[in-house]
Image (tube, helix red, strand yellow):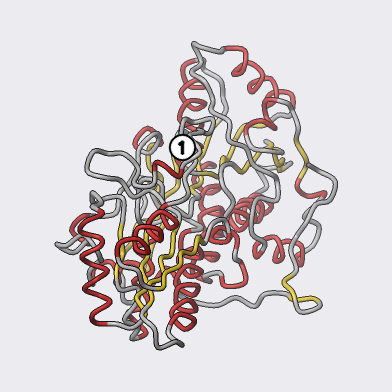
Amino acid sequence: MNIAVAQSGGPTCAINASLAGVFTEASRREEIDKIYGSINGIEGIINDKLVELSTIIKTNQDLELLTLTPSTVLGSCRYKLPEAEADPDIYKKITECFKKNDINIFFYIGGNDSMDTVNKLSKYFSENKIDIQVIGIPKTIDNDLMCTDHTPGFGSAAKYVATSVQEIIRDSSVYCVKSVTIVEIMGRDAGWLAASSCVLKANDENAPHLIYLPETPFSIERFLEDVKRMLGEHKAVVIAVSEGLKMIDGEYAAEEFQSGANDSFGHKYLSGIGKCLENIVRQEIGCKVRSIELNVMQRCASHIASKTDIDESFRIGEESVKYALKGISGKMMAFRRISDRPYFSDVVPVDTSQVANQTKLFPKEWINNQGNNVNAQALDYFLPLIQGELNVLMKNGMPVHFKIPNWF
């Protein structure tokens, strides 16, 4: 048989590691002949735009470099697959592409919306008695997928966030004047990434002094009280905030700073909470204040990637092939944590129907009673995921990336 693999959604440090894992395990299997990559996610299947991966991953060095390269080497998409009843022609195109290329198994690496695609395709093939399996491989720095302990890409993003905040702490503490620095961190509906900045406590850092997450309704009045109290205790106050902070009425706290535009899945484009809070602190408190938006750097900072994250991402790609050859379909591969110390996890399949169109929120029991920080349980959860450093291949003082020119 032949197989196909595609990547979807926002880039991460680890999504290519999962692709490399699929390729490595599939290459070992006598049952599998050709391994196709779909260009730009499911759109490549719809448009029959495939490449045989053995023509671009030719050596072990290529494979190693691919594993350590951030972003999506096959390109990505944000395409919402309609229901089969609403647009049967799209499903016919997808089926025709698979049959034309003798593809029996399709692996889709992506986040919540990608698992929706896996669920819909698997259901369509099953109902129409089409012998094609569909397997989801998780990916998102947001760490908000249900049924998995954590997601590939999150550990590296968390490590970058913690490292950046630590460097911000050093920068902000050099002057004798009172100051507030607000760090805006990705997280639309779930605060996992902002919360992960708490790992600095393991290295005896006091900051971030305050952490605000979407899971707790945000109050400007309470925020100002918190900041004033911290300014009484510390010269330089550093605050971590999720971009998706919401008020008690459910509206985004920085609504006035939003563009109002939505992506193809109906999600609002978010940014601006840091600048919003900066202006409020300046007006109401009057101290030196600045905001810093880490922005897209959180996704692809492979120079500080977590070895644990990359190794696990590769492994979940391998395990997806093993499970697929057992005949499963409509499943997402997931991590199940066995222990924290020593850290150990295994890989298990879960139904995509339990993942698609749902969000795993940061546990409220890991947030303090004041709603402005997290507790030791969060620290125990995050620390194992950021462990280990990689030997990044360098050239002229800069990291080398696996690239395929003239594709997009």
Identify the residue at horizontal 72%, vertical 40% (top origin). 36
Identify the residue at horizontal 49%, vertical 81% (top origin). 171
Residue on which the image places disc 1: 268
> How many residues crowd mark 1 within 10 Å: few (<14), some (14–19), many (20+)?
some
Which element carries disc 1, helix, strand or loop? loop
Expressed as whole percent of the image width and height from the top left, the position of residue 104 reads 62, 32
Query: Quadrant of the rendered structure where residue 71 is?
Result: bottom right
Identify the residue at horizontal 61%, vertical 43% (top origin). 7
Q: Is residue 3 visible?
A: no
- Horizontal side, residue 200 vs residue 399: left or right: left
Q: Amino acid at mark 1?
A: Lys
- Looking at the image, residue 326 lies above or below residue 223: above
Task: Tell which of 40 and 131 is nearer to you.
Answer: 40
- Horizontal side, residue 350 vs residue 96: left or right: left
Total numbered badges shown on the rendered structure: 1
The N terminus - image quarter: top right
- Looking at the image, residue 134 lies above or below residue 20: above
Expressed as whole percent of the image width and height from the top left, the position of residue 98 reads 67, 27
Q: Is residue 25 visible?
A: yes
Identify the residue at horizontal 54%, vertical 66% (top origin). 311
Query: Quadrant of the rendered structure where residue 58 is?
Result: bottom right
